[in-house]
Each structure stands twice: as structure tokens, then as C-alpha cells.
Image (cartoon, helix red, strand yellow):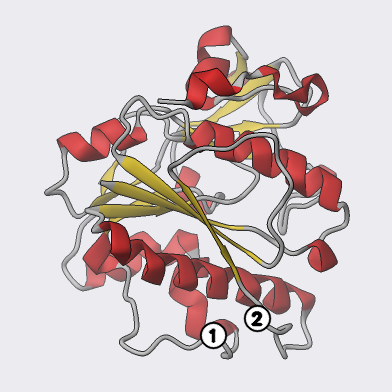
Amino acid sequence: MLVFVIPLKSPQASKSWELVTKLFERCIKSVCNQTSSDYRVIVVCHERPRLEFHHPHITYIQVDFPPANEPDAFCIGHTDKGRKILKGLIHAQEFSPSHTMTVDADDCVSKHLAEFVNQNHNKPGWFISKGFKYQDESNFVYIKRRNFYKICGTSHILSYDLNKLPKNPEYNRGYGYYRFYIDHEKVRETLAKDGNVLEPLPFPGAVYIVANGENFYYGTTKLTFSLFNRKVLYQSIREEFSLFPLSKNLGITEAIYSK
């Protein structure tokens, strides 16, 4: 079984809680659109967002972590994210997962992930080398042909025993304690040093939603899209990743996700 873990920022840390909620709703619908029913989703949050969408495979864990004590806003935000990821991974053991995947709360994922993991449950895991970048309201996506995992946190599927979970997890520590869960660009290398070699996922696994106003890294000034990598956002891509415009109220009915 594949367990998805989604850390969700708090209203206090959001520029727009309404926007964060809309982005998350699209994300959670994407995650729950798997072709296999053998998966679970854990959302770790300070405040549970009010959504019209519900699914029996979703578990919400509400936390009361205090603000991080680092002076740097970057560290504060990532410490909060790291705590939530760790909390979700610890809780995931209740489902006896073969693998887990951390998903950023504004990204979208392929509907084939759970099925693929179930068919390859003895593998140590995968990194997403090929994926898409998307700016909302665009009619195009931009394909990242290699090293997708270096730019996007929604990029690794790991065997549960490779998550480097502490025996006595702590949630009042600083940025460094949670670094493994935050520094996605280093996960592959870190595990390889221990002899655990991840394979590239053999298909595009995720869509990195950029320049939405709530990203840690991507502002509008950092968009470097090449026309060579531009691809029309065909309906098949929309349906595989549930990549629907926020302005159209996501355009998805709950009936699709009742499986």
C-alpha cells in the first residue's frame, strides 16, 4: 500500500488561506483519483480546511506545534513543514504501508502511482526525474525532462523503512532535525550512501504548480520556461493529474473519487 503524506500550512502562515484551501482541494482530488484503491492519504495541518470534497481514504491530523524559533522565515516555514511530514509518516505505520510519498499541498500527481507501487512493492523506491511545471490558468504545461526531483518536493516514493524515522520523534526541534524530510533534492544521494538505490519513476509522476503566491521558492520572476519544453495541456493530461483551473471550481465531481 502507498500512503501519501501532505503537510498543509496554517492560516497564520498563509498569504491567502482561501487560495491555500483551493490549491489543496485540487491537490487532494488529484491524490484521490488513483486507479487503485489500495492507498491512504494523511493530511497534517493546524486547521482543517473547509472543503466540499470528502473521501474515506483521507485522514486529517491536527497539530498545535508552536512557531519555530529560527529567525529566518525560510527556516520557520520549512521547520513547520518538516514537523508535519514527520508526524504524518509516524502515523502512516497504522496502515502498514509498503511505501510512502510526501506531496506538497499545491501540487498534483499521476493517478497511476498507487497501482504502480502495488505492482512493484518489493522495490526500495523511486525518484521522479520527469514531470511537469504548470502556472494556473495556462493552456500549456512545461515538461521537465530530467532532475524534476531537484526542483519539486513532490518527487520521491520511498519504502517505509527508508524514511529515517527517529525512535523517539520530537516536534520541538529546529530546521536541522527535519532536514531529511525537507531537502528533497538530497534524498536520492543520502539514501545511495547507505546502499539504497532509488530508481527513476518510468513515467511523469507529478505536476509542480508554480507562481501561485504561496510557494516557498517559485516567484513569478523565477519562471524559466522554454518553448522547446512547452506542451499543450490536453484533456488526457488534465484527467491523469486532475489538473483543472481553480477559477472553474476545479470542474470535478465527487462521484469520480468515490472508488
Give the mark, 2 or 1, whose residue is nearer the N terminus. 2
Task: Name the residue at 30% across, 56% down.
Answer: 158
Quadrant of the image containing the C terminus? top left
Residue 235, given in percent of the width and then of the height, sits at 57, 9
Q: Residue at x 84, y 46 (%)?
A: 18
Q: Quadrant of residue 65?
A: bottom right
| Residue on which the image places disc 1 | 171
Q: Is residue 208 left or right of residue 194?
A: right
Instruction: Report helix, strand or loop for mark 2.
Output: loop
In the image, 247: left or right of 259?
A: right
Q: CA distance from mark 2 to mark 1?
A: 7 Å
Residue at image location 42% in from the left, 30% down from the top: 204
- Residue 175: image quadrant is bottom right
In percent of width and height, residue 42 lies at: 47, 55
Q: Residues within 10 Å of mark 2 (few under 14, many from 20)?
A: few
Q: Is residue 186 above or below residue 259?
A: below
**Residue 221 appears in the figure:** no
Q: In the picture provided, is 26 more to the left or to the right than 96?
A: right
In this orientation, which residue lies closer to the viewer: 21 or 174? 21
Residue matched to label 2: 65
| Residue 25 visible somewhere in the drawing | yes
In the foreground, 247 or 194? 247
Question: Which amino acid type is marked by label 2?
Answer: Phe
State whether residue 92 is above or below residue 114.
Answer: below
Question: Residue 122, percent across and down?
Answer: 11, 49
Residue 228 shown left or right of residue 222 in the figure: left
Residue at the outermost right position = 15
Which residue is painted at 25% across and 51% down in the image?
A: 125
Please state which amino acid type lies under the numbered disc 1: Tyr
Q: Is residue 66 above or below residue 106?
A: below
Which disc, if any, is residue 219? none
